[in-house]
Image (spheres, rainbow, N blue to C red):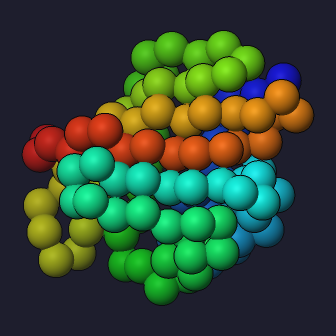
């Protein structure tokens, strides 16, 4: 069973805002890939966790658009101290064990 939207986003928020990586780390598969199609950004599992430790960006809750055991499609807010707040649409893919295989930011837009 895949993790739900609120739990998933809570782990990202804790990782980025509080630098508490334990929850997010436990969700990501060993071969996890984070892709941002808007900025042509790609990171593996370790790079993603390192990014969370170093970033000033802070995600927040948005809206769940669709979820089943294989995929989660949703939005979330992004607070950036050096820019205007924005929202992001994303797709998360899960493996058969419910671990997160990939996180694809597919669109960023200003609020």
Q: Is residue 8 visible?
A: yes
Decide: is 52 above or below 78: below
Residue in front for this viewpoint, 93 or 84: 93
Q: Pick the quarter of the image with the N terminus.
A: top right
Q: Pick the quarter of the image with the C terminus.
A: top left
The answer to which image quadrant residue 28 occupies is bottom right
Residue at horizontal 57%, vertical 55%?
33
Residue at horizontal 36%, vertical 69%?
57
Residue in front for this viewpoint, 30 or 19: 30
Q: Position of residue 103 (x, y in %)?
A: 52, 45
Decide: is 88 above or below 70: below
Q: Position of residue 39 (x, y in %)?
A: 22, 59
The answer to which image quadrant residue 15 occupies is bottom right
User: In the rendered view, does 92 fall on the left or right side of 56?
Assistant: right
Residue farthest to the bottom? 54
Residue in front for this viewpoint, 54 or 79: 54
Q: Position of residue 78 (x, y in %)?
A: 31, 55
């Amino acid at each position: 069973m895949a993790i739900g939207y609120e739990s998933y986003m809570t782990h990202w928020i804790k990782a980025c805002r509080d630098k508490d990586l334990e929850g997010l780390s436990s969700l990501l598969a060993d071969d996890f890939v984070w892709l941002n199609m808007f900025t042509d950004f790609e990171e593996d599992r370790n790079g993603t966790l390192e990014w969370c430790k170093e970033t000033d960006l802070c995600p927040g809750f948005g809206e769940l658009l669709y979820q089943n055991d294989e995929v989660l499609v949703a939005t979330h807010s992004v607070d950036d101290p050096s820019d205007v707040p924005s929202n992001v649409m994303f797709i998360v893919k899960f493996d058969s064990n419910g671990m997160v295989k990939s996180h694809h930011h597919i669109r960023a837009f200003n609020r």
